Amino acid sequence: QVQLAESGGGSVLVGESLTLSCAAPGFNLERLVITWFRRVPGKQLEAVLCIIDKSERATFWVDSVKGRFIASRDDSKSTAYLQMNNLLPEDTAVYYCAAGEWCSRSGSQYDRWGQGAQVTVSP
């Protein structure tokens, strides 16, 4: 069940940037963590990173995005963001945000999901 609203996906060239937004209409994100997942066709859902709270501490699970992806959140707007810089072709995927009580790499731990945003990076 989709309860988060994602926006900001698109098609870019290698080295360009995109920022995804994940809004929570109708409820407060303040006490929840936000995890960004991605899925490449034919592969399993991959947990990318988890932003814990307004201090913007984040746990990264994909080493290749460290230094390029920046997670942030604005709890006053109940919105989280994923700024993706210096994008590479291997970043091409559908990106999902998910809200939960603790950071987990398992999608089954989350009961609030965005609808997904396609990110395509071309050489």
Image (cartoon, grey):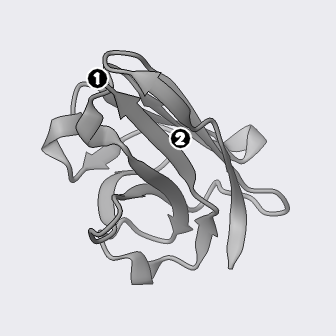
Answer above or below: position of 114 versus 62: below
* Identity of the residue furthest to the right in this view: 26
Q: Quadrant of residue 109?
A: bottom left
Which numbered dot is residue 54?
2
Q: Secondary structure at mark 1?
A: loop
In-front residue for pair 90/101: 90
Q: Quadrant of residue 25?
A: bottom right
Q: Quadrant of the N terminus?
A: bottom right
In-front residue for pair 79/16: 16
* Identity of the residue furthest to the left in this view: 63
Using residue 92 as the reference point, say whether residue 1 is left or right of it: right
Residue that badge 1 annotates: 123
Answer above or below: position of 20 versus 30: above
Q: Residues within 10 Å of mark 1 (few under 14, many from 20)?
A: few
Q: Quadrant of residue 86?
A: top left
* Identity of the residue furthest to the top in this view: 15
State the image coordinates of residue 63 (x, y, percent, origin top left).
14, 42
In-front residue for pair 12/50: 12
Image point (32%, 15%), residue name: 15
Q: Secondary structure at mark 2?
A: loop
Q: Contact (CB < 8 A) between labels 1 and 2?
A: no
Using residue 123 as the reference point, say whether residue 29 is left or right of it: right
Q: Amino acid at mark 2?
A: Lys
Using residue 50 as the reference point, say whether residue 10 is left or right of it: right
Image point (61%, 72%), residue name: 112
Q: Amino acid at mark 1?
A: Pro
Q: Quadrant of the C terminus?
A: top left
Which callout, 1 or 2, points to the residue nearer the camera?
1
State the image coordinates of residue 66 (x, y, percent, origin top left).
21, 33
State the image coordinates of residue 40 (x, y, percent, origin top left).
33, 58
Label 1 or label 2, whichever comes before in sequence order: 2
Which numbered dot is residue 37?
none
